[in-house]
Structures are given as structure tokens and as C-alpha cells.
């Protein structure tokens, strides 16, 4: 059992093959944090890791004793108001106006495996022996309230998941105004905070900053996890690289407003926390009610940022993504959005599908514009039945023809939205999130449905289920194209309005849960104006996400590089689109576009009927299919970062589980005249195995390829010069 409890010292030690996480009960009944990091030899007492000593100018808990101050003790789940002046992990507002609480350790339970989080996405186990769970109960007597802290540790990897829940057992209604999923106090602040930040069309760029005294914070107030900040941050030592050194990663399995911060105090300790954003949040707890926070995931790596990513990739691809598609190869798809936008007919789509089939593409996705009377973005969201002007034979008629052409068929929905020009709005004008007597802000001419109300979610379920039952549909792209505003619901009383943002997310999860369980064969891809809601919560329901509306190959290097910090490349939609690129008007070769998209969930998004030479596309699709297993299931290594140096070179690679095959790529943005010969340093190969470089008759030992590097001579590169050039290398072990 990797969870030890020593009763004489009241110490908990979560210990896996690589990691230790240790805390104990303090003399006031609160929990004190002792250690998180590389595995320690187990002992019964680690209290020496707390230095408890009197300090001047601080407040102490017990009268007559200056030693015991929470200000100088690292906390496990801190509260505010009783000598700790850092931001707390929770706050409870009580009927008498007090926010002071005294939660004390009561009891604990250890079990094999991991219990489900009702109504929320979460990591899971398949066999009980994979992980152990510790649940601690803290109790405040005066309030008659419990906090349960839940910890699961995965034995092999040392991944720890955490969440907290708050139960009101008393007769007074209380208000939870803050409830974090995890908090951890690190003993120093010699760390860099790494986070993934950006905007629409430049999502998840890597940002790195040295921790300083004070609070460094990221978060979302947009109702979605957002492109601005991903619900993730890492703390790495300054010398940590992609391949070596220590790093801690924190990720929230949630798709709405979140907050992640590190507070460095005057003694140089760092308090890291992540959870629901407490800004504009509160939750009423009546007698007997419980509030469950989303789950947070903590990963420790002593082998650099790639090591951190590998732990996240393994966890997310095998113990977060669910269902039949988890282990299945994902199809090569073509989406008509950038090819036709709203302007298409049934004939046009069938023609595109036929051409795509000829190239070996497997799935046709019909994007926005097939329903209601939608010729632009001003109408019809909410009316999910075919526009017969464009699809005279309905969705089924088109789907049958696409199937007859030999391809699977997929469809776009935006279930959370409503246009004012729609039948749905005529019938239910009160189904929007809106504040009475105030203007309703729009985004892209559309409004947000009130998913905090069950009847709204039920209605959407029925509409989508009808479409799915009526036609052979094997894929859904679930889009969400604007942030939430006027977050008010007519379905709830005044005192519950600050619950609506979270209730909305719970409604989205509910609809996803029902659709994915009732239609288990359908592959879901989530999307929010591209990558504005790319988070682990979504991956629990939809095994892949449209990474960004920006399909430019050069922009994609940064987006895909950053996204790969925690998301497996199999989860990232990556399409070859037309040039000049529709977002940045850059012209890159078809080859460069494909070589970037190979390192994602490969597909196309262009009018294929306009392609003059289909043989290039055929070759690309057949290359991808030939190497699909290693590209989708292999170990991904980032090698050279577009965020470092002058950013001119990016490189990365995948290698299969048995280290027999690798596919690697190097991308150079601008041509440098008369420059030196670069070397390509591989990772993850077997030292003493000979690998043949595909397309040449040369072979090299893994040790040479990793430590001496492969000089990139003309044999492996294109002789062509110019900007946006790429090198694609395939290695095969010689048996
Ligand atoms: C969003 C998506 C695009 C496309 C359009 C359709 O922008 O990110 O991929 O589906 O909506 O309106």
C-alpha cells in the first residue's frame, strides 16, 4: 500500500516508486505540509521538516506561547484569519458574519483504486492496484461542517490527484466563497513558473517567469477555461531543461472559470494552488448539502519538462480519455469549413467527399451551416435540423451518399448557443443567460443558453439525439464560440446567482455524459473557436480537441509545442489548410503544412476539388497511415523549442513503445545563408541498436543518433532552399 499512516506522529506518507508526499496533524488539529518531491525512505516521524520557532512581529495561536504560528508553518489546506496571512484554500461565510473556522483532523480512510467524482470529469483507475486513495475528514464543531480532502496516488508514476468537498451538517445555511482543489506549500521559491497563455489563434504559448515575492496568478473569468490561460502551471528549477532537472506540474480537470497562483511569502516559501476561480463565485450550502470541487492533478518529474509531459500524456491518454475511441486509431478527416464556409450544397459536399476518398481520407466532417437557415453567423443556432435549401435530402440523405462514397460522416454542432433569429428563441426567449433590465452582450451575434437549467440541457439532448438516431453519424464536432457574459439564470434565486458559472459547466458535462454514453460509437471532438477550451475536463468526454483556428504551419509550431506540455499529440486536431493561410495570409508549401500536421490528429480543411495534383495528398495520407500507430501512440519528445533563442528552429519526434521506430521532424522558419551544418539529436532510442534512416542506405547506433547527433546533410534534407523548410526523418531498427 503506497499510503502510510503513523498514528504515534499522526503523519501521512503517500509514497510511490518515484514520489513522496508527506503531511501531518499539527497541535491545533490542522494539517501541516512536510514534503513533496522525489521519493524519501519511509520513516515514522518527519516532524524535523517543520521548523517551529518564535518570530517577532507575528501572531501566535496559543496565549502564552509564541512558538506556534501558522505564519511560519507550511500548511496542507490553509484557512485565513488565525495567524496565517497568505491566501487560504477555502473560506466559509457564516450567518453571524464570521469567516473564522476551525477545521480539525477527525479521521481518515485508505482504499485501493479511486472513487468516481459524481458529475465531474476525473482521472480513473482500471485496476484497484494501480492507485490508492486517502480521504481525510476535517471537522469544524461550532459550524458542524466537514471538509473531505481526497488524495489518490498512482503507484507506478507517482501522479497524485486531489480534490476537496465541503458538507454542511448544521442547520444554518452557510456560503462557501472559495474552495480550491489543491494547495501545497513549497519550502523555497527558487522556481520558474511555466504556464500556457495566449489568445484566440495563438493559444498555449509557453511563458516562463522567475517566482518573486507576492502573488503570481493566472486564471479565467470567461466561463470557459480559455485560450488566455490554460488551467495548468509548472514550477521548475531554473536549470531544468526539456530533458533534465526537477519540475512540478499542476493541472485542473475543469472547463470553466479557474484560478492558479503561487504566493511567495516573506520567508521565501511558495504556496501553489489551483481550483475554481473564487472571483464572482459563491455556493450556498444548506443543511445536508455538499459541494465537490473539481479534481486537480499533480505531477513531479526529475527528468525535465519532457518527463513531466510523459506522465501527463500517459495519464490523460489512458486514464482520463474514456470509451471505445481511447485505444482506437483516429481517422484521417477532411472538414469543409475553410473550404466552403457557409456556402455549400449537397452536390458540392459529395464531390469533396469523393475526391477525399480517392486520397485515402477516411472521415468527412460537415461543419457549420447545415441547419436552420444559416447562411452566416447571425441565425439558427438552437434549431438543429437540416436546412433543406442546402441539404434537400436531409442529413441522412447526405450522410448516406458520403457513406456510399466510402467515407464515414461527421457533423458540427454548437449545443450551448442560441441565435435570436431562431425558432428556439421564439419559443424560449428566457433560456439565455441574461440579467433582467440589462442589455445582453453578444459574441459573434450569438447568445449563451442557460445550461444551469436542466430543461435546457434536456431539450438540447433531445434535438442532438434525434439527429444522431436519424442518420449514420460517426463523429461530432462540438463547438462553443464565445465567452459567457451576464451570468444570471432565471431558474435560480438571487442568493444562488454566483453559482451559475459553475452550474453552467456542470450542465455541459451532463449533456456530454448523456450523449457519449448513449452514443458510444461516436467520436467527439471538442472545439471552442479553435482552442479556447482545450482542457482535461473536455478530454474526459471528447477524446480530441480542435487545437486552434489558426491553421498556419508556422504558427502551429508554437501552438502545438505549448499544447504538448500536458496534452498527448493524439488529442490535438491538426489540419492541412489552403494558402495563403486564412488567418495570417502566409504561404507555406503543402509539404510543410503536412509535416506539422502529422504531429497531431491529422486531417485536411480545404476545398479538395480545387487541388490540381491529388498525388501529393495521396502520398501524405499514406505516409500518415503507415506511421499512424507510432504517431498516435508513441512517446513524444520535444527537442528544440520555438520559444527559446531566436525561435527559428523547432524540432520534435515520436518513438514507439518498443523503441523500434521513430518519426522526427525539424522545422526552420527563415533560411539562414551559408550557415553551419545542424545536427539532429534523437531521444528515447535504444543505445546499442542499429537504426536505418528511411530513404538512405545508412544506419547508425541509437547511441550515435542520441549523443553524437545526425549531421543533417543533403541526403536527409531537401536541397531546396528558402524559408519554412522542413526535414522529416524516419528511423527503423534493423532486426
Ligand atoms: C469556430 C471553429 C471553426 C468552425 C467555425 C464554424 O470558429 O473553431 O473550426 O467550426 O466555428 O462557425
Image (cartoon, helix red, strand yellow):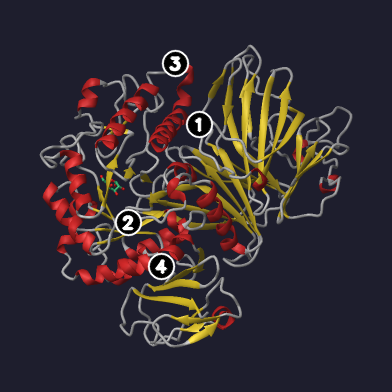
Instruction: Out of 96 and 424, give the one closest to the viewer.
Output: 424
Instruction: Measure how far apart labels 3 and 2 are at the Cα level.
Output: 41 Å
Instruction: Measure how far apart labels 4 and 2 are at the Cα level.
Output: 25 Å
Residue 513 visible in this rendered orientation of the protein: yes
Residue 607: % across, % down: 19, 58
Q: Earlier in the sequence, mark 1 or mark 2?
A: 1
Snapshot quadrant of residue 333 = bottom left
Crowding near the residue tagged with mark 1, few <14, some 14–19, many ≥20 C-alpha atoms within 10 Å: few
- Could you say which disc has been placed on residue 119 in the image? 1
What residue is at 33 percent from the left and 85 percent from the top? 719
What residue is at 66 percent from the left and 54 percent from the top? 156
Instruction: Measure how far apart labels 4 and 1 are at the Cα level.
Output: 38 Å
Residue 535: % across, % down: 46, 46
* Comparing labels 4 and 1, the label whose residue is closer to the camera: 4
Give the SS element for disc 2: loop
* Comparing labels 4 and 2, the label whose residue is closer to the camera: 4
Disc 1, ligand 1: is the CB inside 8 Å? no
Instruction: Measure how far apart labels 3 and 4 are at the Cα level.
Output: 56 Å
Crowding near the residue tagged with mark 2, few <14, some 14–19, many ≥20 C-alpha atoms within 10 Å: many
What residue is at 38 percent from the left and 28 percent from the top? 451
Crowding near the residue tagged with mark 4, few <14, some 14–19, many ≥20 C-alpha atoms within 10 Å: some
Give the SS element for disc 3: loop
Pointer 2 residue: 550
Pointer 4 residue: 627
592 relative position to 13: left or right: left
Q: Earlier in the sequence, mark 4 or mark 1?
A: 1
49 relative position to 407: left or right: right
- Could you say which disc has been placed on residue 686 in the image? none
Pointer 3 residue: 493
Amino acid at each position: 500500500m503506497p499510503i502510510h499512516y503513523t498514528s504515534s506522529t499522526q503523519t501521512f506518507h503517500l509514497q510511490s516508486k518515484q514520489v513522496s508526499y508527506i503531511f501531518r496533524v499539527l497541535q491545533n488539529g490542522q494539517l501541516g505540509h512536510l514534503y513533496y518531491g522525489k521519493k524519501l525512505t519511509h520513516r515514522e516521524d518527519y516532524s524535523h521538516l517543520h521548523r517551529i520557532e518564535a518570530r517577532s512581529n507575528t501572531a501566535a495561536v496559543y496565549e502564552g506561547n509564541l512558538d506556534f504560528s501558522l505564519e511560519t508553518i507550511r500548511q496542507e489546506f490553509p484557512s485565513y484569519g488565525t495567524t496565517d496571512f497568505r491566501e487560504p484554500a477555502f473560506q466559509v461565510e457564516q450567518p453571524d458574519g464570521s469567516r473564522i473556522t476551525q477545521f480539525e483532523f477527525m479521521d481518515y480512510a485508505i482504499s485501493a483504486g479511486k472513487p468516481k467524482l459524481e458529475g465531474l470529469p476525473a482521472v480513473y483507475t482500471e485496476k484497484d492496484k494501480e492507485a490508492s486513495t486517502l480521504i481525510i475528514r476535517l471537522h469544524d464543531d461550532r459550524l458542524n461542517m466537514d471538509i473531505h480532502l481526497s488524495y489518490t496516488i498512482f503507484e507506478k508514476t507517482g501522479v497524485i490527484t486531489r480534490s476537496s468537498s465541503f458538507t454542511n451538517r448544521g442547520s444554518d445555511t452557510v456560503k462557501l466563497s472559495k474552495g480550491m482543489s489543491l494547495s501545497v506549500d513549497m519550502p523555497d521559491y527558487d522556481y520558474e513558473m511555466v504556464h500556457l497563455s495566449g489568445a484566440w489563434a495563438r493559444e498555449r504559448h509557453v511563458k516562463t517567469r522567475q517566482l518573486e515575492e507576492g502573488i503570481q496568478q493566472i486564471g479565467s473569468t470567461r466561463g470557459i477555461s480559455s485560450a488566455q490561460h490554460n488551467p495548468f502551471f509548472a514550477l521548475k528549477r531554473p536549470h531544468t531543461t526539456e530533458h533534465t532537472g526537477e519540475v512540478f506540474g499542476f493541472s485542473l480537470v475543469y472547463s470553466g472559470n479557474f484560478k492558479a497562483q503561487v504566493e511567495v511569502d516573506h520567508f521565501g516559501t511558495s504556496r501553489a494552488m489551483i481550483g475554481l476561480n473564487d472571483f464572482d463565485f459563491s455556493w450556498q450550502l444548506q443543511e445536508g448539502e455538499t459541494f465537490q470541487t473539481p479534481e486537480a492533478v499533480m505531477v513531479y518529474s526529475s527528468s525535465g519538462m519532457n518527463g513531466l509531459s510523459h506522465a501527463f500524456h500517459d495519464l490523460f491518454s489512458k486514464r482520463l480519455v474514456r470509451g471505445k475511441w481511447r485505444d482506437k486509431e483516429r481517422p484521417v478527416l477532411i472538414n469543409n469549413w475553410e473550404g466552403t464556409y457557409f456556402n455549400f450544397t449537397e452536390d458540392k459536399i459529395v464531390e469533396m467527399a469523393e475526391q477525399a476518398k480517392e486520397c485515402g481520407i477516411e472521415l468527412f466532417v460537415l461543419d457549420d451551416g447545415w441547419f436552420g437557415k444559416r447562411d452566416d453567423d447571425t441565425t439558427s443556432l438552437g434549431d438543429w435540423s437540416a436546412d433543406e435549401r442546402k441539404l434537400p435530402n436531409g442529413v441522412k440523405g447526405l450522410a448516406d451518399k458520403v457513406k456510399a462514397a466510402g467515407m464515414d460522416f461527421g457533423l458540427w454542432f454548437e449545443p450551448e448557443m442560441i441565435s435570436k433569429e431562431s425558432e428556439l428563441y421564439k419559443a424560449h426567449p428566457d433560456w439565455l443567460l441574461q440579467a433582467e433590465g440589462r442589455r445582453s452582450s453578444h459574441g459573434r451575434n450569438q447568445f449563451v443558453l442557460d445550461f444551469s437549467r436542466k430543461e435546457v440541457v434536456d431539450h438540447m439532448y433531445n434535438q442532438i439525439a434525434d439527429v444522431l438516431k436519424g442518420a449514420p453519424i460517426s463523429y461530432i464536432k462540438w463547438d462553443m464560440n464565445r465567452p459567457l457574459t451576464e451570468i444570471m439564470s432565471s431558474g435560480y434565486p438571487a442568493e444562488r446567482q454566483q453559482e451559475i458559472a459553475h452550474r453552467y459547466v456542470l450542465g455541459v458535462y451532463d449533456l456530454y455524459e448523456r450523449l457519449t454514453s448513449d452514443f458510444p460509437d461516436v467520436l467527439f471532438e471538442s472545439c471552442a473557436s479553435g482552442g479556447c477550451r482545450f482542457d482535461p475536463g473536455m478530454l474526459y468526454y471528447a477524446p480530441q480537441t480542435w487545437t486552434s483556428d489558426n491553421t498556419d504551419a508556422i504558427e502551429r509550431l508554437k501552438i502545438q509545442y505549448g499544447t504538448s506540455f500536458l496534452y498527448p499529440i493524439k488529442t490535438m486536431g491538426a489540419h492541412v489548410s489552403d494558402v495563403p493561410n486564412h488567418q495570417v495570409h502566409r504561404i507555406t508549401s503543402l509539404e510543410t503544412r503536412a509535416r506539422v500536421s502529422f504531429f497531431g490528429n491529422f486531417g485536411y480543411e480545404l476545398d479538395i476539388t480545387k487541388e490540381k495534383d491529388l498525388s501529393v495528398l495521396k502520398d501524405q495520407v499514406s505516409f500518415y497511415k503507415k506511421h499512424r500507430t507510432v504517431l498516435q501512440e508513441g512517446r513524444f519528445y520535444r527537442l528544440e523549442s520555438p520559444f527559446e533563442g531566436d525561435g527559428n528552429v523547432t524540432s520534435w519526434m515520436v518513438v514507439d513503445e518498443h523503441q523500434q521506430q521513430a518519426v522526427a521532424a525539424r522545422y526552420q522558419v527563415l533560411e539562414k545563408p551559408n550557415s553551419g551544418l545542424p545536427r539532429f539529436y534523437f531521444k528515447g532510442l535504444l543505445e546499442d541498436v542499429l537504426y536505418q534512416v528511411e530513404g538512405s542506405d545508412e544506419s547508425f547506433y541509437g547511441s550515435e543518433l542520441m549523443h553524437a547527433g545526425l549531421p543533417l546533410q543533403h541526403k536527409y534534407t531537401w536541397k531546396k532552399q528558402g524559408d519554412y523548410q522542413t526535414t522529416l526523418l524516419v528511423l527503423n531498427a534493423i532486426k
